[in-house]
Image (cartoon, rainbow, N blue to C red):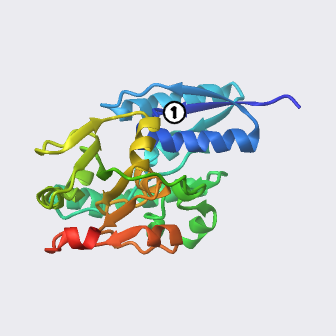
Amino acid sequence: MKKKDIYIWACDFKDYTGEGNLGRLFVKELKSKYKFRVFLNSRINLNNPYISIFKGIIFCWRQYLNKKKVCYLNYLPFWNFTIFLLLPPKTILGPITGGAAYLDTGIKNIFIRGFLFPIFYKFSELLLIFRDTELIFSTKLLKKYLSSTTIKKSKFNYVIKNFKFKKKRKKSIDFLIYYKKHKNKVSFFPTNLIYKLIKNGFKINIVGDNLDIPSVKNYGYISRNKMSYLQSITKYTLSSGENFLSLFIIECISHHVKVISNCKEKFDEPFIVKNTINLNFKKNINLKKLIN
């Protein structure tokens, strides 16, 4: 049987970003499930991804009007209902992202994330009800905002769908931590805890954006292969709470890295429970005794 073509718009297909790697996982499954040839059309300006969103919508409409199968792969935050409103019918949607957690760090942040976002979530949900497509959420953080009808047609925790442990290696790195200069993520980032770890003699390694703290080693954005290697020789990492089920954290666990977290979310998966140390980051704790 002749294979069908599917045209995919990827806002990010890099192998060193969370969105890019999540998209790669989805494409791998798409190719396996549908046996389509996949055309990737990445046009991202990482400093302004919203421009890429509307370029992607136009791209999908062009292919749809030419009677092609289309997929909008990533950068699908659930609050951005305009994407779900404007995409052509029968568009395959990649994993939907977004988290419910935020800190009360100012009136503007409270208004946007505490008041506007839940309204936008409802707009998105109403629009998605009319789309004949399976809804895949990268985590379950948004499940509490959804109706029972939407939950029935949805799949959650996509990031751990194909989880498996990798071969255990000798550990030589104390901490490997992902840092992203994103307003909501920065507000959760446990900077004070990192100072305490350094004071207790632990070596801190940062991937992603550079963290300007003395004694910290910054790797910057690195390839997935290098990231995988560093994770394989790492003992611990930190999860700051806004999204425990990030791809970075899941891949750390797959490499037998213990996750120190202040996340209040409860998980049933044994591999998460076994490899997580829950702490209150604000309390004074004998870190050396606890960790060693």
| Residue 55 seen in render | yes
Q: What kind of residue is marked 1?
A: Ala
The picture quadrant where one finds residue 116 is: bottom left
Given residues 268 and 103, the one toward you in this image is 268
Instruction: Give the answer, above or below, for where 194 lies relative to 46.
Output: below
| Left-right relation of 119 to 63 | left
Given residues 30 and 125, the one toward you in this image is 30
Residue located at (42% from left, 33% from top): 223
Q: Position of residue 252 (x, y in %)?
A: 43, 54
| Left-right relation of 238 to 137 | left
Label 1 CA crowd tier, 10 Å (few <14, some 14–19, many 20+): many
| Residue 91 seen in render | no
Q: Position of residue 138 (x, y in %)?
A: 50, 55
Residue located at (55% from left, 57% from top): 165
| Left-right relation of 70 to 59 | right
Residue located at (45% from left, 51% from top): 247
| Left-right relation of 169 to 8 | left
Instruction: Give the answer, above or below, for where 168 lies relative to 11.
Output: below
Quadrant containing the N terminus is top right
Instruction: Give the answer, above or below, for where 150 lies relative to 230.
Output: below
Given residues 19 and 103, the one toward you in this image is 19
Q: Which residue is mark 1?
A: 10
Quadrant containing the C terminus is bottom left
Q: Position of residue 59 (x, y in %)?
A: 55, 27
In what element is the residue under mark 1?
Answer: strand
How many marks can you see?
A: 1
Residue located at (16% from left, 57% from top): 201
The residue most toward the right is: 1
